[in-house]
Each structure stands twice: as C-alpha cells, then as structure tokens.
C-alpha cells in the first residue's frame, strides 16, 4: 500500500486476523473437543479451551478406533489412505510424464489421437459415471483391493498437459547437444529430462497427494471390507450414528488426523504447491 | 501443435503412452460408452432383462419434478459457493498483498493456503459439528440470539450449511490465484494513481479490479466446476441430500438413483447429461485460457 499510516496498518492486520480466526475456527473447535472426555459434551457444555485428555484420546483412537463401528484402529485407516494417496500421486506422475515425453519427442502413428483421448478424460470425472465405472471394476474383480482404489484414478490430463508444456520449453540447444552426444531416447529421458523436471514433479506431487488422500466417493463404493476402510470413509460412518451416541471427542480427533498428512505436505512444500497450482491452470 | 520429434521409432513411444491410454480406455471411455448404452435401456434391477427404449429415460428424467428440484438446488448451491469463496478469497488476498513485513506476510499466507489440503468430507464433518443441533457451539450461540438452528429439519438451513462448508475449503484456492494476480500488477500504476490523489478504495475499483478480471473470470469457471462435481462428499457426509431432497444436487442424485434406488437407466441418462455439462464447461475454460494468453 502507498499509505503507510500506523492506523491503517493496524486496521489491516486486525481485519486479516479476524478473517483467519473465522477460517481456523472449525479446526480449533475440533481440536478442543478432541482434548476433552466424551461426557463433557453430553452435559451440554461446549468447552472453548483445550482439556487434559489430548494424549489418551489420540492414543485410543489410533489403537482401537471408535466403538460405534467395529473398532477398526484408526492407524489401519491412516495406512490405507496413505497407500491410496501415494499410489495415486506417484502413479499419475509416472504415467503422465512418460506419455508427455512420447508425445513431445517422438513422431509416431496417431500421436494426436492419443493426446486428445487423454484430454477427453477431463470431461469425464468419476462423479458423473459412477455406476458404469463401478461395474467395470467389479467385472475385473478389483473391488476391495488397492488396485481397484488406485488404478481407475490414474489417468491425468492435467499432469500430462503440464509436462507437455514444460517439455516444449526445453531449449533446442540442449536437444541438439544430446543428439550430438549420441544419447538415445531412454538415456535422454533419464539424464536430461528427469533432472530438469524436478520442480514440476514436486509441485504435482503436492497436488496429487492431496487429491488422492481426499478421495471419497470412489473408496465409498469400491471398498466394503472394513479392513480396507480409508480415513474419510471411517469419519463418514462415525458421523452417521445418532447425535447422542456419537463420541464427538473421538470423531473430531479422527477428523484432525485425517487432515494432518495432506496439510503437512501442502505447507511443507508450499512454494512448489503454489507454483504447481498456477502452472497447472495455464 | 509444436513438435520436436527428436527420436524415430514406433514401438518405444507407443509403449510409453500405453499405460495412460489403457487406463483411459478401460476406466473412462468404456464406462462412458456403457453409460450411453444404459441410458437408452430400461432394465430391471436384478438384471433379468432389458429393453431398448431410445430417449425414454431422458424424457422421464427431464420431466421429473425431482430432477427439476436437483437443478434448482445445484444452481443455488453453486452460486452460493462461488460468491462466498470468491469474495472472501479476494478480500483476504487484497489484505495480505498490502502486508509489507515479509515474515508476517508468510505466516498469513500459510494459514490462508492451509484449508486447500482439507478434504471436502472433513470440512463437512467439522461444520456439521459446530452447527450440530444438539451439541454444536454455533447452534448454541444462535440460540442465545433467538435463532433456532436445526438443519436436520430445516431444508434452507441444511443448504446454507453445505454451502458454507464447501466454500470454506475453496477460499484457499481463490486466495492463491488472486494473490498471484495482485502481485503481477505493476506497483508504478498504483503509485501513479496515488499521486493523482486516488484513495485506496478508488484505486482498487478503478485499477486493481479491471486488471484482475481475467483471473476472476477464470476462477468463476473453476469454482463452478468445483461446486458441481467435487462437493459430493460434503453433501454425503453432512446431509445425505436431505432433509427431504433439499440438498440433493445433480451429482448426488446420480449416486442416489444408481446405487440406492438401483434405477440404472435413469441414473445413466443423468450421467450422460452431466458429461455434456462438463464438456461444455471444459470447452469454456479452454477457450478462455486461449484468450488469456493474448491478454
């Protein structure tokens, strides 16, 4: 701002803090609730300050889960979500990078057809073709498996686009140099392209990890075996009980555990994340 | 389309695109074709037989009052989410952009970006809790000022709640883009306006907003797409489309009719309608992105 008066600065900070407090409020209340006993809530008191039960609540949730549905340890759900998120993030990056590499650096039959076919996946989000996609996965015998959770979500037009755009900016001199040195396609990919793509890979990883961890509809219909329950499905099942019987402290502890991993990845890699978000939309 | 064809050969590039193409064919193209086929069949839920009926399913979907309700709910919900998350994202970005202290600015930015990582389902759970009719803290406060909050019985309140939960998560995304847009506005422009005597409000309206309009338009499309297709978890975790069908959006209805109602023909017809909608939105987004390049 051009005006730098102390008063206007204070007003600005106050406004920001007010807005951010409102944004953080639901998370704060969830945290406070997870540090009290369930009985506190049932006495009609809603605490605003953290209580003494932080460690026991989380230890209990992780080890034995929530009694209302089958006592599946939350640690198991975390692990399921983690496998799904890593599988989706890494898988998407690998197959997108390979197909973008082929499309940019080779001339081969039907090149553009393949490219547009990948593009078309943008128009078919899983939400709009739930039933037929479920039938395909079920016919392939992939229900209740990590394969069924991960593979159908791997095609990524966004990631393929991003890599393609990036490959097109690689200077001709570099390609010429590689050609003169007699590097073959695989060699060129490993020694030149991969090191150059490091930031793009990091940026995509952040976005795709959050995407994978936060998948909901797909795990909801593909996994019926309790052992395959992911974090978010666990929370949904815990919420669907009646209000009086819901152990809110445990459910809120679960919600916080569910938002920690993607949050850690996004904040820990914030610089790449912002770059990736802005680049992916160009 | 630029090409750099550095290498010759056929087998290798085909092998490189094969995984992505195989997944696309098996899990995207094939199900989409199935949806088309099923949308023209009426079959009983037990799979004993089906009859080819052309566009009868589409006709019965489009004339169904329940579908009209879902269209209205989706429109209200999407516009609500878009307005709330765009305005708050812009406000926050405009405020944070003026912070001169590097360290404080970094803290504000980190907190503003954080909700992006939160799953829609978790956002739903948190908001469901603070507005819970029996134990919610906001419900309690609203009660103190004489507002009876019970989204389990009151359809309007249920819709408001899912709008808030869905918009809350999206503020972060809009913040990132608005901040990037604000930071690309040349300082000299702002300073020149200040010398001409324009106050902060006037500068924002006359200079900043017009320069941000491409970003804002792009975000409108993205937010609409988000509200349409990515908010299923919020609705499923918080209201299950209820009370009645007050929060049943188009996407939720596809799920409800297909998986709970087992009405495959009509669910598939709705899928096909939605695919056409996504395709139109994608085209708009890309046409506009093409324009953005010349901007």
Image (cartoon, coloured by chain):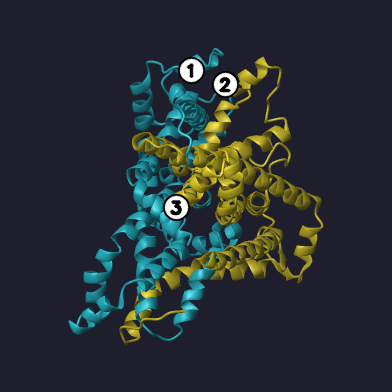
Query: Do the numbered discs 1 and 2 sit on residues whose CB atoms are within 8 Å?
Result: yes
Which of the chains is yellow? B
- Per the image, label 2 sits on a secondary structure element best described as helix
Q: Which residue does the image show at 66% across and 58% down from the upper left?
A: B46
The reply to whether residue B237 is in sight is no
Which of the chains is cyan? A
Left or right, B127 with respect to A210, comes to: right
| Horizontal and vertical percent position of residue A67 | 45, 28
Q: Residues within 10 Å of mark 3 (few under 14, many from 20)?
A: many
Nearer the observer, B146 or B187:
B187
Between the C-alphas of marks 3 and 1, the distance is 41 Å
Query: Do the numbered discs 2 and 3 sit on residues whose CB atoms are within 8 Å?
Result: no
The reply to whether residue B218 is in sight is yes
Q: Which residue does the image show at 62% across and 18% down from the upper left?
A: B141
Res A48 label = 1
Pointer 3 residue: A144
Q: Chain of mark 2?
A: B
Between the C-alphas of marks 1 and 2, the distance is 9 Å
Query: Do the numbered discs 3 and 1 sit on residues whose CB atoms are within 8 Å?
Result: no
Mark 2 or 3: the one toward you: 2
Nearer the observer, A42 or B79:
B79
Q: Which residue does the image show at 48% across and 59% down from the upper left?
A: A281
Quadrant of residue B100 within the rendered picture: top left
Pointer 2 residue: B137
Q: Check chain identity for marks 1 and 2: say if they share one.
A: no
Nearer the observer, B134 or B39:
B134
Left or right, B250 with respect to A216, comes to: right
Q: Chain of mark 1?
A: A
| Horizontal and vertical percent position of residue B135 | 58, 21
- Per the image, label 3 sits on a secondary structure element best described as loop
């Amino acid at each position: 701002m051009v005006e730098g008066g102390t008063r206007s600065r204070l007003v600005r900070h106050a406004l920001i803090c007010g807005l951010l407090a409102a944004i953080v409020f639901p998370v704060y209340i969830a945290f406070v609730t997870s540090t009290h006993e369930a009985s506190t809530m049932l006495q009609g008191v809603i605490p605003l300050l953290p209580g003494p039960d932080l460690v026991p609540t989380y230890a209990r949730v992780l080890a034995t889960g929530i009694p209302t549905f089958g006592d599946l340890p939350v640690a198991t759900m975390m692990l399921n979500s983690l496998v799904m998120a890593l599988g989706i993030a890494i898988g998407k990056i690998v197959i997108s990078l390979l197909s973008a590499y082929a499309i940019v650096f080779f001339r081969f039959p039907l090149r553009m057809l393949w490219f547009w076919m990948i593009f078309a996946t943008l128009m078919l989000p899983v939400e709009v073709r739930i039933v037929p996609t479920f039938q395909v996965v079920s016919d392939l015998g992939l229900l209740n498996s990590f394969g069924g959770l991960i593979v159908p979500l791997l095609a990524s037009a966004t990631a393929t686009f991003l890599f393609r755009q990036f490959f097109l900016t690689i200077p001709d001199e570099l390609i010429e140099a590689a050609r003169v040195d007699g590097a073959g396609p695989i060699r060129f990919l490993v020694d030149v392209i991969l090191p150059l793509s490091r930031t793009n890979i990091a940026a995509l990883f952040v976005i795709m990890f959050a995407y994978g961890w936060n998948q909901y509809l797909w795990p909801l219909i593909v996994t019926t075996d309790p052992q395959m329950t992911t974090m978010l499905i666990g929370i949904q099942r815990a919420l669907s009980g009646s209000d009086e019987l819901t152990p809110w402290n445990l459910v809120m502890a679960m919600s916080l555990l569910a938002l920690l991993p993607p949050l850690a990845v996004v904040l820990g890699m914030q610089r790449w994340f912002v770059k990736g978000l802005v680049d992916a939309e160009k | 389309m630029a090409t750099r064809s550095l290498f010759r050969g056929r087998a290798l590039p085909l092998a490189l695109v094969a995984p992505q193409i195989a997944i696309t064919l098996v899990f995207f193209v094939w199900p989409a074709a199935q949806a088309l086929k099923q949308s023209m069949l009426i079959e009983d839920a037990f799979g004993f037989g089906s009859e080819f009926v052309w566009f009868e399913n589409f006709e019965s979907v489009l004339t169904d009052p329940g579908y009209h309700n879902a269209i209205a709910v989706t429109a209200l919900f999407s516009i609500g989410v878009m307005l709330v998350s765009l305005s708050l994202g812009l406000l926050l970005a405009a405020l944070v952009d003026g912070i001169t202290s590097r360290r404080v600015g970094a803290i504000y930015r980190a907190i503003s970006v954080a909700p992006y990582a939160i799953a829609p389902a978790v956002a739903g759970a948190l908001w469901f809790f603070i507005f819970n009719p029996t134990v919610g803290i906001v419900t309690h406060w609203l009660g103190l000022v004489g507002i009876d909050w019970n989204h389990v019985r009151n359809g309007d309140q249920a819709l408001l709640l899912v709008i808030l939960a869905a918009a809350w998560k999206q503020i972060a995304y809009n913040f990132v883009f608005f901040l990037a847009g604000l930071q690309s506005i040349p300082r000299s422009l702002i300073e020149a306006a200040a010398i001409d005597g324009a106050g902060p409000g006037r500068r924002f309206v006359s200079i900043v907003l017009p320069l941000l309009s491409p970003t804002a338009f792009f975000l409108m499309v993205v937010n609409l797409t988000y509200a349409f297709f990515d908010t299923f978890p919020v609705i499923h975790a918080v209201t299950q489309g209820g009370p009645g069908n007050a929060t049943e959006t188009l996407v939720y209805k596809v799920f409800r009719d297909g998986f709970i109602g087992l009405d495959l023909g009509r669910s598939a017809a709705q899928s096909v309608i939605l695919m056409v909608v996504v395709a139109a939105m994608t085209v708009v987004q890309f046409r506009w992105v093409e324009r953005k390049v010349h901007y």
